[in-house]
Image (cartoon, rainbow, N blue to C red):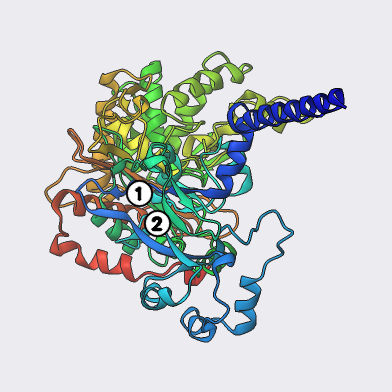
Amino acid sequence: MESRSIAIKLFVVGAGILLVFRLAQLQIFDHSYRIRGDAATVEKEVLYPSRGIIYDRNDNLLVFNQPIYDLYVNHYQLDSRMDTSKLCQILNLDIPSFESKINKDWSDVRFSRRVPFLFQGKIDAVTFGRLQEVLHEYPGFLVRVRNVRGYNYPYAAHALGYISEVDQERISKSGEKYKKGDYAGVTGIEDTYEIFMRGRKGIEYQLKDNFGRRVGSYESGKLDSAAVSGFDIETSLDMHLQAYAERLMEGKVGSIVAIEPESGEILTMVSSPSYDPALLSGSADRSEAFLQLQEDSLKPFFNRATMAKYPPGSTIKPVFALIALQEGILTTDRHITCRGGYYYNTYRWGCHARPGSRNVVVAIQQSCNTFFYMVFRELIDKYGFDKPELGLQNLNDYLYSFGLGRPIHIDLSQESGGHIPNSDFYDSMYVNKGDWRSTYIISNAIGQGEVELTTLQMANLAVIIGNRGYYYYPHLIKSFKRANLLIPSDYRNPKRALIDDEHFDPVISGMERSTRMGTSRMANIPGVSVCGKTGTSENPHGKDHSVFYGFAPSERPKIAIAVFIENGGWGGSYAAPIAGLIMEKYLKNDIHPSKIWIEDRMIQTNLIANL
């Protein structure tokens, strides 16, 4: 009997030891149970940082943050006696919609009766004001504030870009930097500088009771972290010039890029038609606006300034002149005679200039096709008529150094490199048709062949010529405001075209004469020496395109510009006068009285109506 009693005691003691050991294991050694316990009593709240705001080069505020309000509900805390009709009236809901938002499928892991879930998002400030007055009557409902973008100007949509709610792919690739409901830059500056502008989230841990009510800070806030605001950005844009340029482009399809030559900073970038960036700010009707813009046949989302590839027309001629001067094919004393066209065997390519003998300066001034047909053929045939691929490669090496044939690294994610055809391209084009020669590709001499440029690249050509050889990659960022952070080094280090300094003077002289008494006269500015070149880009599907690029003043230029007007006809019809007005507005802040009629005509012309 005694031995039986001892056995029972030993069993009880042993069981107690095992129980104590198990409790120690659960509460001391195994942290997973503590984590599970914390999950039931500690609520982790993400603190969202203020997104960096955006200014123009003159410190005008362009893009700022404005709050929107999301209404969440904790189902466990709801009062069954609450007056739902008043809440429905404020939120513009009917009773069935209210009930469907309240009652979730609780077997779904996404929802819990004790964890707040989104009831209604993107509540505007007016509705929030009315809601805030009565929210105390509705236990279980709480409001969380998020920031979306606000805009002071309805311009520069393609440069600024927009933000949008992140998708699952971006969430998965972000390494937990984003979660469902977060916003991030999608296009424009908002996208390129997302990592600088988004800031860093903070975290706050709050204790809650078994009813889900907050009762205090967890561990006295030791684990909390503050949100860190994103960097503010100063762009290179001049918003007043941007507004003026967009006004001139109303009713037209095309693009404008204006650059400060000494820095590569983009002063104005217009793609027309455009849209008001506020339409995509994150408001409740954003989806409808996005769909309308996406379905517009004129493609307002498409950035024609950086993405559209166009035949440059005669604007390519100064570039070929520089290359020919560098190669020794041309000298300032060499004259080429034009008889109204260029002749080869039984073929004739026409010329709009009057017959006569011209040097390079006058040929650029009068845009003589014959002159440049001859020059182009000599460049291609440098190594012999039967070896055009060698001459073409040599020519292309020069063109690449001008930033052609490849993207030139603007700080936007959407950029085309245009097209500079090489020998492989022509081998493929003429496969089974015999070998190709310089005469086959001679239309490139006047920008009407297979060469294609973007408006951005044309503006950069004006920069290179105005700077006599050097340029910076065009960019939209000027600085990070109030931050000890430099802009990317790509935009601080100059690049150089493969042309010696002395060859620029005759080309610049020809472009200056073009605006005084040649094809670019409509770009002239009283009292300012303007250099420019028009082009007419042939369009097989309709009216030709109007093209111009140039810079002013001729010495140490302050602005370089390219304008491309689709279906605008001659370069002097619309592109040159629009460019002249924009340059004058920037340099003088006003338009000379003698040119008001030109300004009125450009503003009032609607070319879209004729499409």
Residue 443, horizontal then vertical, whole percent = 54, 38
What amino acid type is highlighted by mark number 1?
Ser
Q: From this viewpoint, which residue is outermost toward the left?
A: 527
Badge 2 element: strand
Q: CA distance from mark 2 to mark 1?
A: 7 Å
Q: Position of residue 527 (x, y in %)?
A: 11, 48
Q: Residue placed at 32% from the left, 39% from the top?
A: 477
Estimate the x, y position of residue 344 in percent, counting from the top left: 57, 32
Whole-percent x, y for residue 80 in the image: 58, 78
Local secondary structure at mark 1: loop
On screen, 456 above or below 211? above
Image quarter of residue 249: bottom left
Residue 50 - label: 1
Q: Is residue 224 left or right of residue 539?
A: left
Q: Which is nearer the eye, 442 or 342?
A: 442
Q: Amino acid at mark 2?
A: Asn
In this rendering, the answer to whether 186 lies above or below 225 is below
Crowding near the residue tagged with mark 2, few <14, some 14–19, many ≥20 C-alpha atoms within 10 Å: some
Label 2 belongs to which residue? 147
User: How many labels were placed on the picture?
Assistant: 2
